Amino acid sequence: MKKEEIHLWDIKRILLGQAPPEFLLEVLIRSLIMYISVVIIMRLLGKRMNGQLTIIEMSVMIMMGAILSVPMQIPDRGILQGLVLLITVLLLLRGLNLLAFKNTRVEKLLHGEAALLVKDGVLQLPELSRTKITKQQLYGVLRGKCIFQLGKVKRLYIEPYGLFSIYENETPKPGLPVLPPDDKELFRSLEQQAGQCVCENCGSVQSQNAPAEYCHNCGSTNWTTAVL
């Protein structure tokens, strides 16, 4: 379209574009057909598409958005092209899932593995770095589960699809508080463990009145009082 043909007062072009008004009815029919097709395809893709998505499934969802827009809105493109693409995506995902089901290595390659972020109340710093999860993000997850110190956590995993799985100790141990730094009032409400220091960097507890010069787990020199 040439710039000379563009005018701010051209209401017909702004509302309808260059297509005739009759194309609005065709858009409605196209949209209904594609909507019904998507519902069928989503049903065939499986129940996983209704839950937390893996990387492969998220990629399919993004592709479907691009596939659907063209046959619904562009008059010189047929619906059949979009249906063929949807069926191709369906077969691709089902094929990859079948391959992953039969081969563990393929499953790990496609979907990834769970990462251990907290073990026995101690942060696994290399895994946090690898998964690009900050401590404050992790602490926010724990606070959301009403866990305010790391000593309550036996294991904390991040699953391949992004959810956190938390297993608590049956008997809570002293650990590093995970409260926001500015919330002094709530921090004072926690039971402080006299004679037990905890590394502020990784949560490793040292049962001594005077902490070591550095943490033997991570090398940090910052210590605070452990809480229960």
Image (spheres, grey):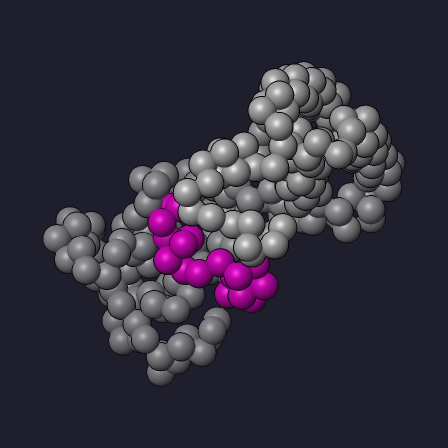
Residue depicted at x 30% and y 48%: 148
At which x and y percent is residue 129?
A: 54, 65
Q: Nearer the viewer, residue 114 or 78?
A: 78
Q: How many marks?
A: 0
Up-down relation of residue 143 to residue 12 (above or below): below
Q: Give the quarter of the image for residue 225.
A: bottom left
Report whether 131 appears left or right of 47.
left
Q: Main secondary structure of the magenta part?
A: helix
Q: Nearer the viewer, residue 146 or 119?
A: 146
Report whether 63 appears left or right of 218.
right
At which x and y percent is residue 87?
A: 81, 28
The segment highlighted magenta reads 125-142
Report whether 104 appears left or right of 132.
right
Residue depicted at x 67% and y 40%: 66
Q: Give the quarter of the image for residue 197.
A: bottom left
Question: Quick check: can you spot residue 214?
Answer: yes
Query: Per the image, is 14 magenta?
Result: no
At which x and y percent is residue 14?
A: 49, 39
Task: Give the residue at the far front of this rendering.
Answer: 4
Q: Give the quarter of the image for residue 161.
A: top right
At which x and y percent is residue 7?
A: 47, 48
Query: Per the image, is 126 magenta?
Result: yes
Residue depicted at x 35% and y 83%: 213
Question: Quick check: can you spot residue 48?
Answer: no
Residue depicted at x 49% and y 54%: 118
